[in-house]
Image (cartoon, rainbow, N blue to C red):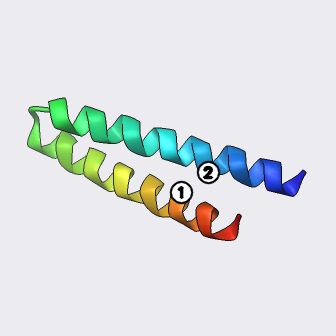
């Protein structure tokens, strides 16, 4: 059960990371792009953290 929860969290953060990366590519506003970069890096680090635990 715990392993399944970790997989769900991993895939959630992975999807969020990819989503923010796609939004960042199409973004024209520099401030919004900076926020999306921060969000994408956060979700990437969380996904890596969960990947190492699995």
User: Which residue is more in the foreground, 38 or 3?
Assistant: 3
Q: On residue 47, which mark appears? A: 1
Q: Is residue 49 above or below residue 12?
A: below
Q: Secondary structure at mark 1?
A: helix
User: Which residue is more in the foreground, 24 or 11?
Assistant: 11
Instruction: Give the percent coordinates (x, y) of residue 24.
Output: 22, 39
Q: Residues within 10 Å of mark 1 (few under 14, many from 20)?
A: many
Q: How many numbered discs sit on the rendered protein?
A: 2
Q: Is residue 26 above or below residue 21?
A: above
Q: Is residue 44 left or right of residue 29?
A: right
Q: Which badge, 1 or 2, comes first in the chain's sequence?
A: 2
Q: Is residue 24 left or right of residue 47?
A: left
Residue at the spot 61% in from the left edge and 69% down from the top edge = 52
Residue at the spot 30% in from the left edge and 41% down from the top edge = 21
Instruction: Give the percent coordinates (x, y) of residue 38.
Output: 31, 55
Which quarter shows the C terminus? bottom right
Residue at the spot 36% in from the left edge and 50% down from the top edge = 40
- Circles 1 and 2: CB atoms closer than 8 Å: yes
* The quadrant where residue 36 appears: top left
Which residue, given by chain and number where applicable, does mark 2 sit on? Answer: 10
């Amino acid at each position: 059960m715990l392993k399944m929860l970790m997989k769900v969290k991993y895939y959630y953060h992975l999807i969020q990371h990819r989503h923010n990366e796609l939004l960042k590519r199409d973004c024209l506003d520099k401030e919004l792009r900076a926020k999306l970069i921060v969000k994408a890096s956060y979700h990437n680090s969380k996904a890596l953290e969960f990947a190492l635990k699995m």
